[in-house]
């Protein structure tokens, strides 16, 4: 390494050591290697990949770089001594945001943004010097801890270790003798949460429209331009904060607010007034975690003081989103060497400075796992399988999840997501359906809960992105009897088996000491463990593939697999396959009753054990310590939940295979109006069978949504830019002031299942679409010809000079277009990024796309629904095909129930409406929407604003008009 004097640093023992290596930059047809003195070597992609594998190089994002050089299917690995500038950033600026590109780093560091590949590579040395320079500052916080962690990283082989230690001023002698323990065991430095008395129920004072307008004006700030439509929206939203009008009927408002209304501040104004006046929380639920982050940023207007905002605003997500400190501790106890340890240490560094330990959408750098070559890193560090041991955990009092739960009880604004809100609703619904009493409202420490009991739902709910409620309810209220789900339950009950490692201890490890010494309890626990052997065990996939299933569940799944293979339509090894359940094959009819009997034994055993624990908890109430009570409570609720919902649901599904009507088996006495649809499926990933099982979905999932969430709630606002479906025949069919466009909104949000009609409000977008947008339907491109489609994308992206989003209805077509598109766009200076290609999560790709005005991005549904890119960075959207719904078994059932062709077309219109809404995000935007499917019916174009010109042209004419318009 070459030494440089630290910039303006009074520390004589600190120095900046830059690695004496070359930096790697990517070009359209290859790469460049640049030395610190500016010497440039141009090399081919193959040579660059070979060099990256055999020698240390300085680069930005090793995973992305290697994928670009070798392709998405390559298993090539970079040299272990690679200097990734993102590693250094993660250490120096933990829990701080940057885009994982040279341009993003430049903006984060306040340095000039580099241009061409040569400049990007040379910039990496400048960025490294700047970051190391920050470490030399006397004001850099917690230097002792940073030195300890850097030393541990250096001993583990981290390439930046010696340079970081030198910059921190650690003496060269004795560095290796330092312990890294203090740097890794960050839980010792985290504050404990404190239990507080439960808040009293809120009062029910309404919010007046005038007060909402005044609060909105205050939030906008002095001198802000008056936006009448936003003010009207805030005033109308007060309807959801009125007292509950009748039992089973909330104060419900459906509000469609066109793009540009500013609905977030519009509903925050009355929500904050209600919370402050009534001393109760308002829950705001979104579909995407990106929008959770955006709403959180808007609350800074409500609470400019960060400390106050920490108390008044809480982001709530499921447990699987937060760092588990016990997982972190176990990872730190492994041998300190290699990439695993380095990844763990950088996570520990982040956790010490994180606001709330949120690894999905919070302040965790989403690019870090892929940059380290560990894409599943976040999943490994969170509790994704219900393995939490609650008060038995040594980190219980510091747990990020427990902190968030307790803060939410006393916050004014809780920002949640649809999955979390509906998860608890689905559990309560299942308990009631199966004849169980709901879990008790008062219990120790909130064990096994993500939300309060159904009787204690948040007093006011706002569902933003309300057009996704149907899909969110569909996911929450569905049932899956599959190999993955069954093995997951077995792991929860029995813990790791067959010599496998893991911290999941199973019931014996969690509650064995609670029943020790009581023959009844010990026998009940053993009965559960014995009965759980009927579930799929470790290696079940291999046994199914080899035709050697073991136990009732695996034998049942083997017959399901055979029925799907025989009857399903296999479109190639990379796509999942499904088939109808009925008529069942001979094998399924033989094995289903056997599995039902085995599940019955397991259910009885789990209920018996829960009863014994419940009785012990009651009998020893006066002598049990709080921590022990919490353990009892967690075990009881976990057993009740899994026996009363998961297993009971599976048994209902199996009864349908035994000759009962599907709905009769689920307790529905009206077979003429089926409520459910079942099917068998083989799930595939990367061409491999990864799961097999039986699936059950509600045909209308908003029915349980209305029963468990809407009806009990005092007030609900459901809002979106795309609630209504606007059809050509709306004017002709409207009767009594009720337009069919609102009828679909009521159906898809659950409002149609309530005893009274909801209030409705529509606010048109303030944008001048006739001036700002154009729509073209290209009529001479064969959508089935991959070369023609790719050529159209290429020419359109070049015509717009970047700033283009390409949307696809199939991943395979996206990948095919990318292969044909990447070189010509890169040669034209237009960076191309792609979902399912680049080693980055979707949120990071969108962030990069937003920041680079000439970038292009290819994606599927997740990109269509999650892009918020105002300005020049998004000026073109190109759709490869009309986004018809996938013609699977579930869609077939819903199509029949909801109107046949009209249902198909409603889905397409809403998808087109949502996609077009991404294009114009501010009054200064201009953009074009291009559909490459000439078969798009005119009746579907009512999805677009009526004032936007729609032209059906050839590709050449379209290109000419695009250039003129943009």
Image: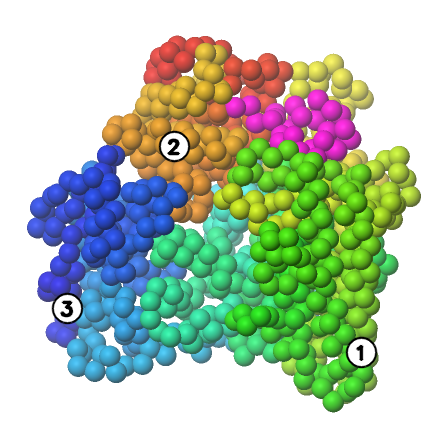
Residue sitting at x 16%, y 52%: 22
Closest to the camera, between mark 2 and mark 1, is 2
State left or right for residue 531 relative to residue 391. right
Q: Residues within 10 Å of mark 1 (few under 14, many from 20)?
A: some
Disc 3 from disc 2: Cα separation: 45 Å
State left or right for residue 557 relative to residue 328. right
* Residue beneath disc 1: 612
Disc 2 from disc 1: Cα separation: 60 Å
Closest to the camera, between mark 3 and mark 2, is 2
Q: How many marks?
A: 3
Scheme of colours in the image: rainbow
Residue 609: image quadrant is bottom right
Residue 515: image quadrant is bottom right
The C terminus lies in which quarter of the figure?
top left
Q: Residues within 10 Å of mark 3 (few under 14, many from 20)?
A: many
The magenta-colored residue range is 881-910
State left or right for residue 698 relative to residue 537. right
Q: Nearer the viewer, residue 627 or 768?
A: 627
* Residue beneath disc 3: 15
* Residue beneath disc 2: 818
Q: Residues within 10 Å of mark 2 (few under 14, many from 20)?
A: many
- 871 vs 444: above or below: above
């Amino acid at each position: 390494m070459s030494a440089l004097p630290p910039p303006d640093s009074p520390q004589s023992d600190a120095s900046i050591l830059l690695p004496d290596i070359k930096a790697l930059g990517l070009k359209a047809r290859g790469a460049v290697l640049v030395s610190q003195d500016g010497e440039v070597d141009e090399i081919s992609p193959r040579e660059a990949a070979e060099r990256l594998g055999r020698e240390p190089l300085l680069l930005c994002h090793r995973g992305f770089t290697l994928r670009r050089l070798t392709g998405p299917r390559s298993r090539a690995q970079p040299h272990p001594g690679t200097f990734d500038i993102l590693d250094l950033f993660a250490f120096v600026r933990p829990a701080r945001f940057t885009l994982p590109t040279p341009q993003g780093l430049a903006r984060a560091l306040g340095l000039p943004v580099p241009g061409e590949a040569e400049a990007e590579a040379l910039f990496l040395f400048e960025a490294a010097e700047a970051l190391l320079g920050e470490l030399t500052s006397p004001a850099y916080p917690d230097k002792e801890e940073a030195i300890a962690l850097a030393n541990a990283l250096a001993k583990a082989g981290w390439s930046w270790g010696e340079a970081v230690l030198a910059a921190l001023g650690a003496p060269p002698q004795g560095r290796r003798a330092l312990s890294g323990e203090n740097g890794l065991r960050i839980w010792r430095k985290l504050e404990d949460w404190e239990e507080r008395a439960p808040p009293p129920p809120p009062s029910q004072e309404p919010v007046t429209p005038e007060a909402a307008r005044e609060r909105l004006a205050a939030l906008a700030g002095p001198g802000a331009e008056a936006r009448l439509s936003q003010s009207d929206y805030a005033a109308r939203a007060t309807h959801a904060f009125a007292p509950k009008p009748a039992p089973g009927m909330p104060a419900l408002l459906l509000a469609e607010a066109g793009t540009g209304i500013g609905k977030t501040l519009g509903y925050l104004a009355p929500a904050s007034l209600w919370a402050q006046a009534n001393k109760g929380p308002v829950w705001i639920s979104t579909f995407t975690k990106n929008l959770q982050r955006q709403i959180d940023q808007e609350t800074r207007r409500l609470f400019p003081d960060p400390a106050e905002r920490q108390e008044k605003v809480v982001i709530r997500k499921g447990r699987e989103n937060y760092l588990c400190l016990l997982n972190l501790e176990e990872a730190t106890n492994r041998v300190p060497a290699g990439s695993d340890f380095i990844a763990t240490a950088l996570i520990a560094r982040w956790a010490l400075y994180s606001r709330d330990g949120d690894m999905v959408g919070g302040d965790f750098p989403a690019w870090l796992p892929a940059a380290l070559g560990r894409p599943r890193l976040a999943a490994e560090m969170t509790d994704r399988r219900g393995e939490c041991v609650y008060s038995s955990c040594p980190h219980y009092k510091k747990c990020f999840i427990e902190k968030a739960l307790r803060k939410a009880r006393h916050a004014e604004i809780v920002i949640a997501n649809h999955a979390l809100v509906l998860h608890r609703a689905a559990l309560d619904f299942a308990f009631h359906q199966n004849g169980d009493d709901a879990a008790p409202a008062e219990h120790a420490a909130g064990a096994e809960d993500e939300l309060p009991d159904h009787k204690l739902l948040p007093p006011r709910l706002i569902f933003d992105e309300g057009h996704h409620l149907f899909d969110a309810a569909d996911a929450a209220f569905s049932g899956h009897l599959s190999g993955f789900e069954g093995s997951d339950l077995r792991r929860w009950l029995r813990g790791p088996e067959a010599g496998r490692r893991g911290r999941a201890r199973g019931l014996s490890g969690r509650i064995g000491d609670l029943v020790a010494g009581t023959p009844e309890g010990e026998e009940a626990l053993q009965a559960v463990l014995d009965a759980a052997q009927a579930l799929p065990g470790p290696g079940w996939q291999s046994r199914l593939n080899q035709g050697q299933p073991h136990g009732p569940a695996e034998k049942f799944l083997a017959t399901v697999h055979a029925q799907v293979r025989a009857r399903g339509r296999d479109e190639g090894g990379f796509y999942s396959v499904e088939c109808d359940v009925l008529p069942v094959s001979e094998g399924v009819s033989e094995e289903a009753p056997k599995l039902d009997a085995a599940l019955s034994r397991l259910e009885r055993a789990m209920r018996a054990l829960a009863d014994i624990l419940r009785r012990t908890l009651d009998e020893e109430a006066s002598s049990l310590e709080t921590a022990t009570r919490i353990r009892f409570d967690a075990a009881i609720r976990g057993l009740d939940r899994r026996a009363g919902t998961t297993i009971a649901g599976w048994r209902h599904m199996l009864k349908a295979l035994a000759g009962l009507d599907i709905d009769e088996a689920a307790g529905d006495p009206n077979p003429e109006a089926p409520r459910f649809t079942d099917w068998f499926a083989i799930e595939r990933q990367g061409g491999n069978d990864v799961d097999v099982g039986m699936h059950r979905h509600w045909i209308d999932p908003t029915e349980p949504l209305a029963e468990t969430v809407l009806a009990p709630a005092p007030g609900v606002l459901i809002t979106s830019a795309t609630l209504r479906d606007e059809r050509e025949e709306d004017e002709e069919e409207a009767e009594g002031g009720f337009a069919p466009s609102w009828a679909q909104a009521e159906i898809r949000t659950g409002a149609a299942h309530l005893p009274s009609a909801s209030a409705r409000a529509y606010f048109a977008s303030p944008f001048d679409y006739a001036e700002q947008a154009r729509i073209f339907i290209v009529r001479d491109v064969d959508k089935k010809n991959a070369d023609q489609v790719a050529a159209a994308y290429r020419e359109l992206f070049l015509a717009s000079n970047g700033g283009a989003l390409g949307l696809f209805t199939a991943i395979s077509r996206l990948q095919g277009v990318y292969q044909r598109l990447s070189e010509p766009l890169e040669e034209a200076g237009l960076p191309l990024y792609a979902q399912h290609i680049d080693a980055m999560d979707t949120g990071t790709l969108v962030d990069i796309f937003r920041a680079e005005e000439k970038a292009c991005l290819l994606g599927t549904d997740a990109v269509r629904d999650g892009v918020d890119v105002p300005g020049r960075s998004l000026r073109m959207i190109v759709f490869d095909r009309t986004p018809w719904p996938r013609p699977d078994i579930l869609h077939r059932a819903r199509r029949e129930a909801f109107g046949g062709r009209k249902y198909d077309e409603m889905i397409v219109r809403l998808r087109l409406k949502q996609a077009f809404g991404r294009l114009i995000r501010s009054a200064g935007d201009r953009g074009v929407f291009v559909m490459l499917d000439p078969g798009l019916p005119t009746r579907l174009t009512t999805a677009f604003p009526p004032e936007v010109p729609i032209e059906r042209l050839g590709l050449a004419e379209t290109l000419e008009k695009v250039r003129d318009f943009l």
